Image: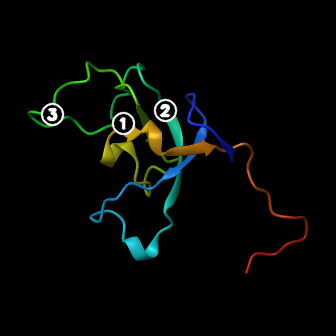
Amino acid sequence: MRRTRTVRRGQVVVLLRPRSPAIWREDQHSPLIVKRVVAVPGDPVPPGSVPPLKEGQGGHGGRVPPGRVVLLGDNAAASVDSRQLGFFPLGDVLGVVARPLRRAEGAHRR
């Protein structure tokens, strides 16, 4: 991971997991999550990527608000991401994945 808070669409980021007891049990999950950036501040909000705003929350004009990003997991069926939690704070992003990890030649998974 390369430490940065400057992100672009399509990058995979590591960020602090939001506190949401209804979704994650604190004792069974890492404090970090990995998600793909699908929209950055000022971008149009992709359809179906964030839950509709509730009455009184104010609008975002169909754009990602300043200081927020839309993040989606690559496994839509099992991912907890912007589809459930809405916009993520850009300040929670720790860095960008620089390259995928590869298992060493001949290593076996146990």
> At label 2, which amino acid type do we have?
Val
> At label 3, which amino acid type do we have?
Gln
User: Which residue: 87% across, 64% down?
Assistant: 104
Measured as percent of width and height from the top left, residue 64 is found at 36, 26
Judge left or right: residue 42 versus residue 1.
left
Which label is found at residue 49? 1
Q: Residues within 10 Å of mark 3 (few under 14, many from 20)?
A: few
**Tag 3 and tag 1, C-beta contact below 8 Å:** no
Q: Where is mark 2, residue-wise? A: 38
**SS state under label 1:** loop
Q: Is residue 9 above or below residue 61?
A: below
Rendering colour mode: rainbow
**Tag 2 and tag 1, C-beta contact below 8 Å:** yes
Q: Where is mark 3, residue-wise? A: 57
**SS state under label 3:** loop
Measured as percent of width and height from the top left, residue 92 is found at 46, 45
User: Which residue: 34% across, 44% down?
Assistant: 83
User: Which residue: 54% across, 41% down?
Assistant: 36
Measured as percent of width and height from the top left, residue 52 is found at 21, 35
Residue projecting furthest to the bottom: 110
Residue projecting furthest to the left: 55
